[in-house]
Amino acid sequence: MRSHYMYLPVFLVSALLVAGAGAQSPPGPSQSPPSPQAQTLAQKPGAVTISLDDAIQMALQHNHTLIAARTMIQQNQAEETTANLRPNPVLLGDSQFLPVFQPSQFTSDWLDNTAQFDIGVSYLFERGQKRQHRLQAAKDVTAVTRSQVTDNERSLSFNVATLFINVELAESTLELARQDLKSFQDSVTISEERYKAGDIGEGDLLKMKLQLLQFQTDVSAAELSRVQGLSDLRQLLGYESIGADYDVAGAFDYQAVKGNLDDFQAKALANRPDLLAARLGISAANSQLALQKSIAKRDVTGQVSYTHLGYTNDLSLFGQLQLPIFDRNQGEIARAGFAVTQAQQLESSASGQVLTDVRDAFEGLHANDQVVTLYRSGYLDAAQQSLDITEYAYKHGAATLLDFLDAERSDRATQLGYRQALASYLLSLEQLREAVGTRSLP
């Protein structure tokens, strides 16, 4: 690896190493992880600041897509009411032997002695406990829908956390860009003074000023990323639920996670709402099968009628039952049986998918953890120390401009790389939470 000390005189290197108490000594090494305070920008007076937990709760309460999905539960509960209704009775009535084509005979005597009047009530008696099976099938569908809505909440929480971390990354990057810009502006000022003193040429000064453009561009890009990230997050929170001038506040820092793969998979099997929905789908399919079998039981229609004919008043009883000779609902019973098999297979697939999701998320978290650990093991300090020493040497004429720019690029790339690695780690942590089905991890 190329050493930055090769351009320095031996005595200057020695002086730099022991000049910790001197007025012109290089600044000390920076801390590896950026502190949470360093990652939070100054807030506008009166601006609303929300944490990640606040953001998730706001989204669960105000996200329009989720609210629309929740109405499916209410719709299914209304279906339960419909399924539990009994058949309505039927009111019957008729008049016979009216002299419509002989109007002259249409007299009270004709109505009293010749015309016949009937009035009755019929009712459908359901057999096979159809109403009970309809109600149970509707309740099972509601239970499946409720779990599906809970799964939508799980996905929404993950999406909110993802955008929240992206905003934190943008703000951390913006803070770094502003610090780098201020530091480099100081270096440009010193270069101008050295140019006026004749220590450097005009070409070196122009290179410094051109490099300043890159820092200014970085600040603009970071500001745009932050604004867009806050806008996208606001949409998930419920656009009307928070003002446009809000900001996020969180510890954009490393978070250690305990637990092994088996623990996470066991927890996922017990908590994942999509898996629960698949399990409830088996119950719903069995309820539909029982309903179709009950439909095969033919219903009985009973009727009671009162008849007035002349001076005679009679009461008649009628009954009707369809003979299940051809149609015994064979097709629907068979279809419902295959639907049970389908639901069982979907439950097995969902179980495997849960285990796969947890494993993928766990391995992703482990890989990103290793990368973050590498940065925190000393590379951040090394990059900062290299820049500090080279900058000090350049300002005192012991290092070239190329050395300084190279050290500056290395430090900036290292700092940005660490922040991106940290964001990837935090995102993989959120993926693990989503895969397990709960935000509470060991």
Image (spheres, rainbow, N blue to C red):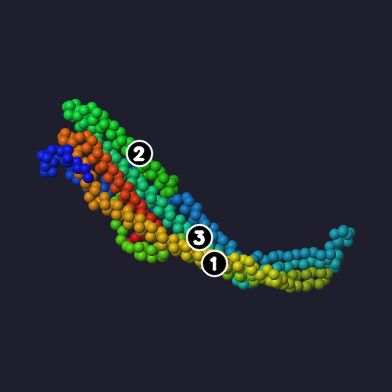
Q: Residue at position x 85%, y 59% from top? A: 100
SS class of the residue under badge 3? helix
Q: Residue at x 31, y 49 (%)?
A: 421
Q: Is residue 379 above or below residue 340?
A: above
Instruction: Check contact, mark 3 vs mark 1: CB within 8 A.
Output: no
The residue labelled by disc 3 is: 145
Query: Given the image, on which type of amino acid does mark 1 rest?
Result: Val
Based on the displayed image, in which of its 4 quarters is residue 97 positioned?
bottom right
Rendered residue at 65%/65% (across/down): 88
Q: Amino acid at mark 3?
A: Thr
Q: Which quarter of the rendered picture does the C terminus lie within? A: bottom left
Q: Is residue 260 visible?
A: yes
Which residue is the site of mark 2?
221
Rendered residue at 13%/41% (across/down): 13
- Sequence-first disc among 3 and 2: 3
Q: Residue furthest front?
A: 1
Other-residue count near label 1 (Cα within 10 Å), few / some / many at <14 / 14–19 / ≥20: many
Alpha carbon of mark 1 to alpha carbon of mark 2: how far?
Answer: 55 Å
On screen, residue 285 versus residue 207, left or right, reads: right
Nearer-the-camera pick, 336 or 62: 336
Label 1: element kind = helix
Badge number at residue 1: none
- Mark number, residue 340: 1
Q: Amino acid at mark 2?
A: Ala
Q: Quadrant of residue 157?
A: bottom left
Image coordinates of residue 148 in percent, x first then y, are 48, 59
| Structural crowding at the residue carrying mark 2, measured as other residues with C-alpha within 10 Å and reported as few (<14), some (14–19) or many (≥20) | some
Give whichever of 2, 223 is nearer the camera: 2
Q: Is residue 312 left or right of residue 357?
A: right
Identify the mark nearer the N-term, 3 or 1.
3
